[in-house]
Image: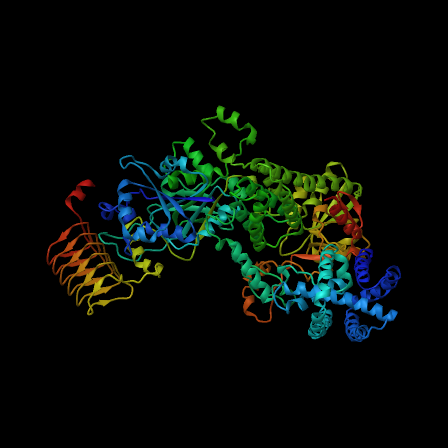
Amino acid sequence: MRLHFCKDQLLLTRLQSETRESASRGRNTFCVPLALTGSEAASGMMADKVETDESDKKAEIERSKSEGKELTKEEKQRLRKEKKQQKKNKEKKDDATKPDGSSVPPSQKAPSSVPAAGADATATSDKAVKSKVELKAERRPRHDSDRSSKQGKKRESSQQQAASAAKPKVPPSELQPVVKRLPEHVQVDDPDVVKKLAKKLERQQIPLRSDYGYKVSLFSHLHQYSRKAPLTQQVGIPSSVIHPAIVRLGLQYSQGIVAGSNARSVALLHAFKQVIRDYTTPPNEELARDLVNRLKPYISFLNQCRPLSASMGNAIKYIKKEISNIPNHCKEDEAKSKLLNCIDCYIDEKIVLAAKAVAEIAIGKISDGDVILVYGCSSLVNHILYEAFNMGRKFRVIVVDSRPRLEGREALRRLVQHGISCTYILISVVSYILPEVSKVLVGAHALLANGYMMSRVGTSQIALVAKAFNVPVLVCCETYKFCERVQTDSFVSNELDDPDNLIVTRKGKTQLAHWQEVRSLGLLNLVYDVTPPDFVDAVITELGMIPCTSVPVVLRVKSVDQ
Amino acid sequence: MELQAVMMAAGGGSRMTDLTYNTPKAMLPVGNRPLIWYPLNLLERVGFEEVIVITTKEVQKMMSTDLKLKMDVKMKLDFVCIPEDEDMGTADALRHIQPKIKTDILVLSCDVITDVALHEVVDLFRAHDATLAMLMSKAHEFTETVPGQKGKKKAAEQRDFVGVDQSGKRVLFMANEVDLEDGLSIRKSILNKHPRMLIKTGLVDAHLYCMKKAVVDFLTDNKSISSVRGELVPYLVRKQFSKARSSPKPKDDTDEQSQTKSDNSPNNELLISSRDDRLLQLAQERSCWNDHHGDMSEAYHGGKLRCYVHIMDQGLCYRVNTIAAYIEANRLVPKLLFEEPAVHPSAVISERCQMGSDSMIGALCHIADKTSIKRSTIGSSTTVKEKVRVTNSIIMHGVTVEEGCNIQGSVICSNAVIGRGSDLKYCLVGCGQRIEDAAERTNEVIVGTDQLMEI
């Protein structure tokens, strides 16, 4: 909240310097009403009322201004408040006109206000959001007409506001539904966004992968691809547009040969190393800029094969930063070897050494006689268990598994091969086994900025049941998987896997063979789910054991470092 | 570049000498196009831009003069001529062009006609980092009567036994009946790793292989292997399961190679390690995927050499290396070529000619009145006079068919002349032969005397 106040104070000082002389008194009095509007906006309906009030009072104030009367204190306050509101609306409108159409801003506002409100994304809140959206849509033309009369004065200050608003991303969304540009992959049911994506892919010469099968309505905003229609059908065989290492990687992602957050990031960096090795700077181009542009279509291609994970996103950001930081005078060979070194360092630091550090800290928490419950196959958790076993701790492991991926089988094989005694159960009986368990150790796909944890679907169930049994849940996660996204439910941003994977043949009979023909049947194969921080007792990272709510602190420290 | 295409067009067509003694196999007309056009078209459709064509000088000359090839094939053809007198096997040819090979290769034979989605084969090669990926298809029975064949065809002459694993993608075993004297023996180690093996016999090998560059390098060191299909592929399939000798790390490369020159055959393939083997290893360790379940070994059982096969169950796949296959291919090719009209625009066909819809007429033909052409292919520059009935036949270029002939189920090679009123049933007329008037031949192979002496 403090950040938010600072930003508004900047605004206010500017406003005040424009319009009147005494600043200090105004600042204090302004903080209070803004806080009120903040909490009102969070509940949803009040902000609209405030806007309507302001627009009425604005007309009044304008009148009194034109008459030359000295405005009363309340009127001054109101004037300032609604000037600020208008600026925000104008900025929203600017942002809204960038993505296509005016239909997008209301739908964008709806999902972004849902996490801001912190409400559950059930159907009821959707309805409430929709009605707010309708009201907003009504009010928009009125605001536009008012705003057009004040264009000249506002232009200069709105630019500065846009620049300052870009930096603190999280605080404004808590206050008001600011229109943020939503990523394409959660707007699949919006035809404009899909058209934009198709155009962008065409420009980059990447084929578009088409969705498959009927999507459950709650998740119709996400992509759903079929494994039997790989993207390589549309890529020419000696792929010349896309580097062969990237085609290979995309294929391995879409077939699930490389699965797991760490494995995907390492494989991605390996492929990028090959791309960098084979890269030659075209004449009249700078390596720093051209290489980044060369990587963009590859990233789109990989995104089409399988949506990028948070760890991959962070790795890509790091590489792009390193590439653009290469000085101009650097020779090509030198630059390339420097980049290859950077990639190796990144992997060593963030993945290999981080795993060692996490294992050291976690081993401190594993004592003899422990019964540890793990879910699925997390490379980091497996590493911790190997290390603990090597150090001589006596414990046993219960591996929980779930369909359709059945990754627990692989975890079971690896642990047993190492010598650890294991039990294997399916997730449906986890509540029967929990009385025996002393702690739960899970891996994470990403840790979100509001303390929520995104992991394989089923993890939040286990965390919930463990909480009910008072069993501590420890999440093991390296810091490079920390993500600046904010999410409180598993619906807004997720991944839909091939629904045909749910079909199983037992004794020659396949019950779901013709599921597409049954109109009222939809198959849903979710990949991730989001666990609230209440169910997680500690997160073990290479920086130590931190509570879930310290994730934004770590992110801030990291961004300050860089 | 990801893959280099290599087309083997130097084959002699040893199983259909009657057709090929004058025309090289690569240039035999199928559906009025030279046979080599079909695999070249496949490569072009998929996106290749250049092909290395290994062939003889004669074929190269014919190909450069052939109009169809010049017009339709837009890829760059890099001809490598091998001398005709040397008996070069396909693997010898690969060894010959080893300096040109810079990346992994896709080897094709010139006699394969298929509409396979090539990405299926190449995806296996890419996704699993395979050493070899091949294409096979379910064999279809040839229903047409082959001219000149007396008696029923012996079915079980040279069966291929192919053993695949449960998923149907990994090749575990490959042998030809000729090589198996006592019976089929399978090593226990293979069964331990893959307890469920399906052995298939009715498969046609399309002679389409995706191979790693290391295999070509291996061939240069091992001069004893001379045929890809006969020796190299079974060798690679066997080597998947050979006991891994202490695999040397990349650093010890140079020492190993200098010592064990004679016996470093498996080492070369195992040393396909890229410079970032460590990262690939790390990614594989961290990935929670395994290709099999039920035993304690890691993905691929830790083996570095893997051979995969894609078995087509739908669609066309023909290898035109026997007369029966040739006839069958001619029958089915019109279905493949839908862009081109069955009748070439420059052919002159009189109105009172009855032509079936599944016949193909080549360029510059003259078809006179009262002729009936059903289910046949007629080559370019052919003249068919009046009152001729052609059914179920293949007539190549430059043939003259005089009036009143009746040709059924036959193959007439180029530049032949069929005399007036002859009646040919299930005959094969060789190149440049002249059938006298009013001849009646059934089930005969009519070739010149010089050809007879060659055999």
Check the image and name the residue furthest to the top. B259
- A376 up-or-down from A51: above or below: above
Front residue of this view, candidates A519 and A258: A258
Report the coloring of the rendering. rainbow
- Quarter the C terminus of chain A occupies: top right
The percent coordinates of residue A248 (x first, y second) are 53, 47
Quadrant for residue A404, please give it. bottom right
Front residue of this view, candidates A300 and A305: A300
Q: Does the image show residue A548? A: yes
- Quarter the N terminus of chain A occupies: bottom right
In the image, is B101 to the left or to the right of A561? left
| Residue at left offset 49%, top offset 24% | B258
| Residue at left offset 16%, top offset 43% | B450
The percent coordinates of residue B397 (x first, y second) are 22, 54
In the image, is B116 to the left or to the right of A499? left
| Residue at left offset 38%, top offset 40% | B230
Check the image and name the residue furthest to the front. A68
The percent coordinates of residue A120 (x first, y second) are 75, 65
| Residue at left offset 56%, top offset 66% | A515
In the image, is A319 to the left or to the right of B75? right
Quadrant for residue B229, please give it. top left
The percent coordinates of residue B1 (x first, y second) are 47, 44
